Image (cartoon, rainbow, N blue to C red):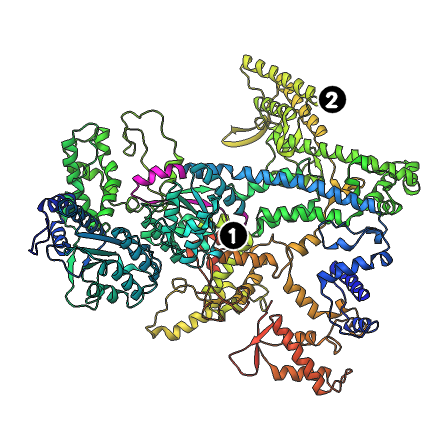
Amino acid sequence: MAEVDETNTLVFQEDDHRTAYIFSPTDSAEHQAAPQNQNARPAKRRRTSKKGANAAEPDHEPQPQPQSDYHGGEADFPALFNGAESLDAVRLRRTTFETAWPVLSGRIQNVLRRANRKTLDEVALFMREAEDEAETAGGKIPAGFIITGPNIASQDLLFEQMAEGLSEATGAKVVRLRSAGAPNLKAVLKKIIRDATSRSADGGDDAEVSIGSDGRKYLNYDLEALHVFLAAHDSRRVIVAFEDSEAFDSGLLTDLIALFHSWHDRIHFSVLFGVATSVDLFQQRLLKATAQQLYGAQFDVVQADSVLESVFMGAVAGSQAALRLGPSLLQSLLERQKDQVAGVHTFISSLKYAYMCHFYANPLSVLLAEERLLTNELLQPQHLEAVRTLDSFKQHVEAAVDARQLSHAQSLLENDEYLVRQVLEQTQKRKDYMTQLLRSLHLITATGLHPGRFTDLYVSALADGIDLSSDVSPVLDSIRRLNPSQIIDLIHRLLAAISKGNPDLDLDGWEDQEESEELRSSLTEITDEVQALLDQSKLSGKPLKSKYSSQSKILRTTVVAQKVQLSHDTATLTEADKAFSTAVDNLTDLLSRFIHVDPIGSLFLHEAWVYDSKSPYRDVFVPRPATTFARALARPHDYLGCACCSKPDGGLACTFPTTSILYHLYLEAGALLNVADLWAAYYTLVGEESELALDERAALVRFYRGLAELRLMGFVKQSKKKADHVAKLKWL
Amino acid sequence: MGYNGLFQLPDELVLTTLAQAFPSREPQIRALATLVHPSAAPCRNLVLYGTKSTGKSAITAAVLAALENDDIDIDDNGSPGLKFAIVNCVECITGRHLFETVVGKVARALRWDGAPLKCETVSQLTVALSKMLKYTPRPDNFRFVLVFDGIDRQREAPPTLLPALARLSEIIPNITTVFIATSPPAGFLHTPFVSHIHFPNYTKPEFVAILGASPPTPLPNTTQAETTELWARFTAAVHDALARAASRILPSLRHACQALWPRFTAPILAGTHAPREFSKLLVAARVHFRDERLLDPGIVSAARRLQTPPPTQTPTTTTDPSTLTNGTVLPKPPQPTSSAPDLAALLPTTARLLLLAAYLASHNPARHDLTLFSTHHHGRRRRRGGLSVGVSGRSNAGRRSKHRKIARKLLGAHAFILERMLAIFASVRREWDPSGDEQQGMDSDTGMAIATLASLRLLVRVGGAGGAGNSDPMDRGGKWRVNVGWEVVRGLGRSIGVEIEEWLVE
């Protein structure tokens, strides 16, 4: 029995992580029938596999690492290099992941919480003041409308914070309602009463809720119970938050508001609506009489764009992010945010998934671990072999050869120890690169001259590098067009940026470091020069201009003999102007020298710390089941791998699985399929004249089964229009 | 005042006080007091009816409380002659809830300390009330008044509810059941001889008198007498202007007066008019009387005030009529904003495209789909120009027919099958959104967009209940309908550079 269980375990383990596998029932039947011919009931997965694997481990597993905790949380990653990866390396990959992700996750949560704070404060203020206001406004119910944007699911955090914050700020009970849990009035009231009475009562005396002071037992949807409870707790306020108010039935909302209004003299209800579209649309759905019972204020949540921006800065671009996401993956993530209904939370889980994929499947990710853990023993020959297959290694060696560093290239290729040294040196180079990248980005942002958002800037910096002197970048052109005082402002901004750094990016200021010495002194020099020129020009009364400023070209109109002549004239530049032009030139040269980053793809060994593959992400987060089904049915031989079906032209063959044949016939049919015709067509294909030569009974059985499968997959359904026909459901 | 069996009206003092508290409701107060007072002419069932905000509930509560207190003062042996309980039926969710509330309130009014009774049906209610009222010894003149406020708005009322409640007094002799309703149909209690008291809506002099009872605080430049007189004339003017059309009932008229008053008196504050010049003031404020937004501020009434910081210094004499001297800026009436730009900014591209496709599917007949979306013959789509030939050809023949067709976009949205909408989406997606990714077809993002639109009720599933119960929302054969109007869709289309009109056949 242990034998069987063990094989099952192995089968499950192998198959679980393969995208496609060939299911061959005959094999497994033989396999199972051979050792024991008792009941061939498929073994249950969870219980038996654990036991079986434990029992079978010593003699079957080549590695000492226990596979038994495969289901548990303590599992190690699988050994890569076909299992040749050492246990230490595996563990190191795992610990690296486990230390890297929580840092980011904490940061992200911070950013999200901070983003909501302003809205929360406003809502709390409104709710506090509404207590008095509502009295004057004729007993209306205070209502906060929180414009959340269409992705209600991502507002969970907001409402959670709001529930905490409001109950602190106003001493009210906060009840959160979602449309899914609120089918009718009774259920809503039950939930309101249950939540409002349970949250604060730490004693949890449930009896108090349902039985009043006079021993009366209340119905569980009777607000009287809530009233009695609140009276006992010296509180009168209840805030009811409708998280996705659009999805609530408007009749239900009307009833509830009327009820709250009627109870208003005893329980002070306030309501909060999460509105996805607009308050106007929401108001149109309410009765006018209901709307008049509300006394509302509108609150806007920080737009998803800017939340995304800050999450991006903290978690993707920030210096704490261990793993870099590559430009193409980032681009597709950002596009998805824009085009699809995908909230920030989708972005965050995609980010986490990228981390997981990288550390799980890339053996070189071990190089991201701390330096002291990276010993020479850790790097196995397989690691070095893997390094030598990298594209960036190839580029690097070719570059070395081109640069006539032949011994370097040769050692890289042949000398393992040399390569290990080189590889380990890359850690420092990686860090330098990141610092340079972030500083450059920070300086560009500080100039305030780059149009577009930080996300786009970052992605383009990774993909193409930053080269200010190239024609693409608009920054230098903008600088040249600035007037002297703007130039001085700009330099001051840059100096401030150097000294302060950027907390969003986790970038410390680098004023006291020697790299910034040259930049800072040159900047100060230019300022002084420009300032002096400016003072001088003020004294002389002549405006200071450079050769780039637009006034330098003058369109001159001359009327000669009743003809108008237009001529471009280059205004003459004074000495001061020339000096200023030189200063501007110096500034642009300086900036383009210091703000410079190579594309990330050009770095040696970037594969170890850049994750840039789109396909697992798309497969997991944007699955396309319909397309997958259609393709599998249209070209089954791609998946089955059998010789009989694969024709070069990919046409229909009788050896296809029945469902696939029926699918091909289905594609040729119109909106209604006559089942008899379908059967006739099918039988001609597989019937006695064909290669398969099935008899009618066997073919009919297959036909039925295939048709049933098509129905199961939602391709056809029974038609009411015509007897003996099925309706075609899928057109795309 | 012991019970001596003689007909005796309630104390005149009490009634006068009440009549002063509720102006122009004296006949109703006297009738009600007479019909419930134990020593006057207590009746079994009593129906109070009238439109809303005519004082039915308030007067009932006040009269009963006054009579109860009155009796306590006078009664010799200390046992009150009248007790009452008022049940607000609007607050009762089910019939059972109503019964239990009745029992609870009656028990509280009687200070009953027996075990609380469970009460699920009308018959159990009868038993419970009998136990408390009939089988407990009471003084001879004891009368219990049970008031059902808003009984016509009771939810989940069993059909026997009203007749059964009306017959309570047949079983329990010393109970009076009062029903408060808006407009009771004739004989709705299925009982003969029910007394009715009608609470008519107020007339203009009554309105003016009631509103005049609470004049606003005097304006800075005037005396209280002047303000009160101006207020009276002002309320009369507001009544003439608005009562028939917009503010029939007292609260809305009062709200209208309060909303208009600061604007009306702004010229006095500014010093341009004296409080005596009523007609000039009226002419100056004419524009506000026409403004509907003042009367119906909508649900977001507080927003603007929260956003405007209060001005720090008191503005001096200013001609801006919306600024008061006490420094508060009047809330401006909300501007009518179109929701289209909001929606366009909120939805991501795919959702917008889907919504547009759904609009087309709802508003174009399916038979034109081939003409509109097929690229088969011409390599490009024809849009609506392509159809005009056929239409004009037919219209020549059918010109005589008096049958005029209503433009389809003026009619409501029709239902469409989800698959058809997706087909339209797939065919126009590339043309409308060339920057979109290359991968065509349905993926989970499209599904999520549809689900979002459905949860926002911009797309509505129709016949979900009529079909196979709550069937799978992603069933491609399901029927849906678009739930946004033409204006919104046009704005949406323009936001991605599509003139949606070109794609509508008619």
- Residue B475 placement, left or right of B280: right
Q: Magenta stretch?
A: A127-154
Residue type at mark 2: give it: Glu
Residue picked out by circle 2? A514
Residue type at mark 1: give it: Gly
Q: Nearer the viewer, residue A12 or A470?
A: A12
Residue B296 in the image: x percent, y percent?
A: 30, 47
Decide: is A144 above or below A720. Answer: above
Residue A556 in the image: x percent, y percent?
A: 54, 28
Q: Is residue B145 magenta?
A: no
Decide: is B3 above or below B385. Answer: above
Q: Secondary structure at mark 2?
A: loop
Q: Are marks 1 and 2 on the same chain?
A: no
Please tell me whether mark 1 or mark 2 is closer to you in this view. Answer: 2
Decide: is A668 above or below A313. Answer: below
| Number of numbered discs overlaid on the protein picture | 2
- Which of the image's four quarters has the C terminus of chain A? bottom right
Q: Nearer the viewer, residue A164 or B113?
A: B113
Q: Secondary structure at mark 1?
A: loop
The dot on residue B497 is: 1
Residue A66 in the image: x percent, y percent?
A: 80, 52
- Residue B65 placement, left or right of A55: left
- For the question of whether residue B206 can be seen, the reply is yes
Q: Residues within 10 Å of mark 2 (few under 14, many from 20)?
A: few
Residue A427: image quadrant is top right
